[in-house]
């Protein structure tokens, strides 16, 4: 990994809804209506206008992403992406990769310079954390190697175990 790419990636243990970045990524469900985990936290922090916009946007298929305003968040944008449930079936890894690529594509189109990702699909969707981390880090590195935007990507981990996992993966 080149020093330029390394300097563009941050690992942080924090609440993603409190970050002052241009965009946060929401680990959403297909209906984009809020729910548990990151999705519920994002909707609660952003306020009811986020839900109203999500209803207008409609559904988001697994592996795709949609962008909305950030409303009461510090972030100007929320990029909603739907990760796969982990069942060990072929294609799940590619769907998870697509979540990161599609989120980064929307961020680039919106002129986002700073973006924060949660650990997509590792909560109730039960994707193994080490595999999800490898997919997230490798996909972001590939993107940054070929694109100017976003300038900085943050992996915002809720727990210390995830911070250690992402930090170790980036050093490897």
Image (spheres, rainbow, N blue to C red):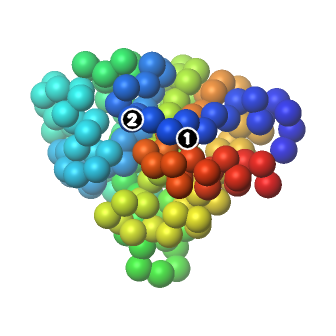
Left or right of residue 87, residue 50 in this image? left
Residue ranking furthest to the front? 160
Chain-order first, disc 1 or disc 2: 2
Left or right of residue 124, residue 2 in this image? right
Answer above or below: position of 87 versus 52. Answer: below
Which residue is depicted at the point 79% across and 54% down?
A: 172
Left or right of residue 133, residue 25 in this image? left
Provide residue 37's location: percent of width, then percent of height. Answer: 28, 50
Q: What number is the disc on residue 155?
A: 1
Provide residue 107's location: percent of width, then percent of height. Answer: 51, 30
Left or right of residue 166, residue 103 in this image? left
Which residue is depicted at the point 52% across and 30% down?
A: 115
Quadrant of the frame with the N terminus: top right
Provide residue 91's location: percent of width, then percent of height. Answer: 52, 73
User: Which residue is denoted by mark 2 in the rendering?
Assistant: 15
Which residue is depicted at the point 64% across and 60% down?
A: 134
Provide residue 79's location: percent of width, then percent of height. Answer: 40, 36
**CA gap, disc 1 to disc 2?**
11 Å
Are the residues tagged 1 and 2 within 8 Å (C-beta)? no
């Amino acid at each position: 990994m080149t020093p330029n790419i390394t300097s563009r990636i941050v690992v942080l243990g924090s609440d993603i809804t409190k970050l002052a970045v241009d965009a946060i990524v929401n680990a959403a469900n297909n209906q984009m209506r809020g729910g548990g985990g990151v999705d519920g936290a994002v909707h609660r922090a952003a306020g009811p206008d986020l839900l109203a916009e999500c209803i207008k946007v409609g559904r988001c298929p697994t592996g795709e992403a949609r962008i909305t305003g950030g409303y009461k968040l510090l972030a100007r944008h929320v990029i909603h992406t739907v990760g796969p449930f982990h069942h060990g079936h072929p294609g799940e890894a590619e769907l998870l990769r697509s979540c990161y690529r599609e989120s980064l594509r929307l961020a680039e189109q919106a002129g986002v310079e700073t973006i924060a990702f949660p650990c997509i699909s590792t909560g109730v969707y039960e994707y193994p954390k080490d595999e999800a981390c490898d997919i997230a880090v490798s996909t972001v590195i590939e993107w940054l190697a070929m694109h100017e935007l976003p300038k900085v990507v943050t992996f915002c981990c809720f727990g210390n175990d995830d911070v250690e996992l992402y930090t170790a993966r980036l050093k490897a």
